[in-house]
Amino acid sequence: MSEVHRTDPGSSHEVVVVGGGIGGLGTALALTREGRSVRLLERADSFGEVGAGLQLGPNATRILREWGLLDKVRAAGVEPRRLVFRDALTDEVLTELDLGQEFQERYGAPYVVLHRSDLHSILLEACREAGVLLETGRTVTGVENTEDTAYTQLADGTVLESDVVVAADGLRSTLRGQIVDDEPVGSGYVAYRGTVPLAEGDPVPDDVVAWVGPGCHFVRYALRQGDMLNLVAVFRSPAFDRGESEWGGPDELDAAFGDCSDTVRSALAHLWRDRWWPMADREPASEWVKGRTVLTGDAAHPMLQYLAQGACQALEDAHTLAELSTGQEWAKALASFAERRIPRTARVQTTARMWGDIWHVDGVARVMRNELFRTRDRSDYKYTDWLYAP
């Protein structure tokens, strides 16, 4: 390393967190709560979150309760009554999961849906109140590790010294490449999103509903205490399968849902058509740590959306890393973190892929799936215990 520059030369921080999304903010907050001094670096010129709704299972809301944030999350969101699966072609209810008292007693916390930006704002405010140093417009280009120090290199030539660097810089992480030699895996599916304001007196849907169909699905649930609906339409792109560079456009959206029920097709008019999100993940990684650098969140385990666990697993990472950082030196804490979290998140990643395949089957496989869903014991939690239980 040539010349070392340091911003705020009088300020020393044990931990540098790279990335100011939900995972990065959660990690910064959790570590600060354990007495660590944390500097968080966000590449964008301001903090913000892209997207619309997200779902928080009880594995995440338990953590938010521990951090003293669950009341704010509940006030900003909606607690749905059920998760409901319908056939996208016929509208038939296939199965459901009751999210009421028995569910909450079993898992020790509620299921909440809310706007991504609302959760982001709650975490950002909590980080400010906890004393995290928050910096925007800071592009990280790499990290150099020694036995007991990490040197974070910024695009402007600044180098920051810390005990640990936490890479929370997302699916297309800059820092992951220093630990894992891989690339994102495109699924061929693309998501369109939209929100619909609900006027006073309009009925507010109290379920999270997923219509599952051949090569497509549609999800709807209420946000912001019932002030709006969140809509998501996902489909497999034929142009992607043909190897074309331009794929997933609005013409393909309409064609993908052409055979779906009136309920689903009529909702497509409320989607944003000027932007769409290709769905990608990565293969589960066997290494998350190099020296004093550790991967978390989507930088460590990006996953497809079918289990609604992206934000939840990032918050689990934050909680676990902070817990393990207490009472032991960093090298052991990072090793213990990877040992505990890699098997868990790899299972979520691979199960999400499998669940997506099940949602999108056609023909005889669709008939079989529907029958399995119909005959499922709706009081049996064996398929959710592994994901939600403490």
Image: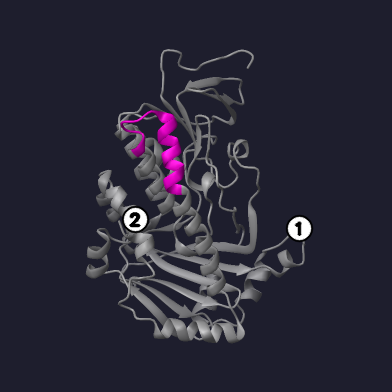
* Residue contact between numbered discs 2 and 1, judged by CB atoms under 8 Å: no
Examine the rendered structure and indicate whether residue 114 appears above or below residue 135.
below
* Residue 83 falls in image quadrant: bottom left
Label 2: how many residues lie within 10 Å, few (<14), some (14-19) or many (20+)? many
Front residue (pair 386, 154): 386
Task: Specify the color scheme.
Answer: one colour
Name the chief secondary structure element in magenta.
helix
What kind of residue is marked 2?
Answer: Asn
- Callout 1: 10 Å neighbours few (<14), some, many (20+)? few
Q: Is residue 329 a member of the stretch shown in magenta?
A: yes
Q: Is residue 276 visible?
A: no
Residue 337 lies in quadrant: top left
How far across and down, in percent of the image, does residue 89 sit?
A: 54, 83
Residue 205 horizontal side relative to residue 166, left or right? left
**Residue in the image at 35% along x and 43% along y:** 319
Helix or strand or loop: what does disc 2 sit on?
Answer: helix
Q: Which residues are magenta?
A: 324-341
| C-alpha gap between disc 2 and disc 1 | 39 Å
Q: Using residue 216 as the reference point, say whether residue 100 is left or right of it.
A: left
> In the picture shown, does residue 174 fall above or below 146?
below
Q: Which residue is mark 2?
A: 59
Between disc 2 and disc 1, whose residue precedes? 2
- Say which quadrant the C terminus sits in: bottom left
Report if residue 376 lies within the magenta region.
Answer: no
- Residue 215: where, in percent of width, then height? 61, 74
Q: Is residue 38 above or below residue 211?
A: above
Instruction: Report the front residue among 318 and 86.
Output: 318
In the rendered image, which quarter is residue 103 located in? bottom left
- Label annotation for residue 245: 1
Q: Position of residue 84 (x, y in %)?
A: 39, 75
Q: Is residue 34 left or right of residue 215?
A: left
Instruction: Identify residue type, mark 1.
Output: Ser
